[in-house]
Amino acid sequence: MHAQNVALILVDLQVDFMPMGMLPVAEGDQVVPIANALMPAYHTVVATQDWHPANHGSFAANHPWRKPGQVIDLHGLPQVLWPIHCVQETWGAEFVAELDTDRITRVFQKGTDPEIDSYSGFFDNGHRKSTGMAEWLRARGIEEVHVLGLAADFCVKFTVLDALKEGFRTTLIREATRGVELEAGDVERAVAEMREAGAEILV
Ligand SMILES: [Zn+2]
């Protein structure tokens, strides 16, 4: 059992990020049994949930003549366009059925504002609004977080970087994450960036 001041953060273990989902992450399903095996060792387990309205600005389909993978300016921020995914109240936005959700202490939803995306579980991509996760963790006495989930090169990376900025000792559980890899090597570059920012990388 980990100490009371350590929390596990599960990033976006949702249907649409599984291999059969709308924004598939290769081998994303392999992360789920590892998450299930780890959860009992933590007093606090937090899950982030990508939770978009249908008119979300990160969806290529909401921009005429744009397609997934292209980058646009979305209200002043560069935005990678994605397939429609994790739409509120749809199956794709649900946690995968195999995940032991009974062990989750608290869920933090993100990406609810149609005008800005939110990769990190802590803040939107412009750092304009907090999801309340850092404040909630601190109120529980959490000083250290262990992070796993999807995808390594986007939501996991930004969650880890924000956890460090918020002052939490932060460990990435490397075997329990997989990446989108828009470009080959993106995951390794993301891991290097997390390490340089101060994260422990647990292989
Ligand atoms: Zn999203």
Image (cartoon, helix red, strand yellow):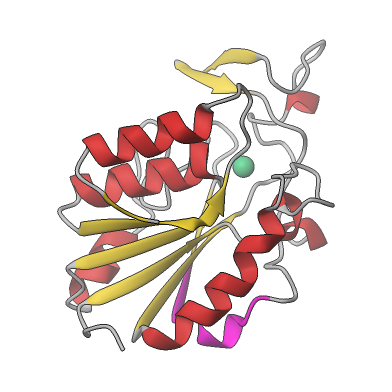
- Could you tell me residue 90's position as x and y percent? 79, 59
Where is residue 31 shown, x and y percent of the image?
Answer: 60, 62
Q: Residue at 41%, 42% (x, y): give it.
A: 157
The residue lying toward the viewer, choosing from 158 and 64, is: 158
Q: Considering only vertical position in the picture, is 64 above or below 167?
A: above
Q: Which residues are magenta?
A: 99-107
Comparing 4 with 93, the one in front is 4
The residue drawn where x is 46% and y is 33% is 188
From this viewpoint, is residue 159 visible?
A: yes
Between 165 and 185, the one lying in front of the other is 185
For residue 87, say whether it is visible.
Answer: no
Reply above or below: 93 against 154: below
Look at the picture and state if 115 lies above or below 22: above
Image position, residue 115 (x, y; %): 55, 31
Left or right, 46 with reference to 6 = right
Compared across the picture, whether 199 is left or right of 181 comes to left
On screen, residue 51 versus residue 66, left or right, reads left
Tally the numbered discs: 0
Give the image quarter of residue 81. Answer: top right
Residue placed at 64% from the left, 30% from the top?
58
How far from the left and from the top, in percent, is residue 69? Answer: 69, 20
Is 124 magenta? The answer is no
- Which corner quadrant holds the N terminus? bottom left
The answer to which quarter of the image holds residue 76 is top left
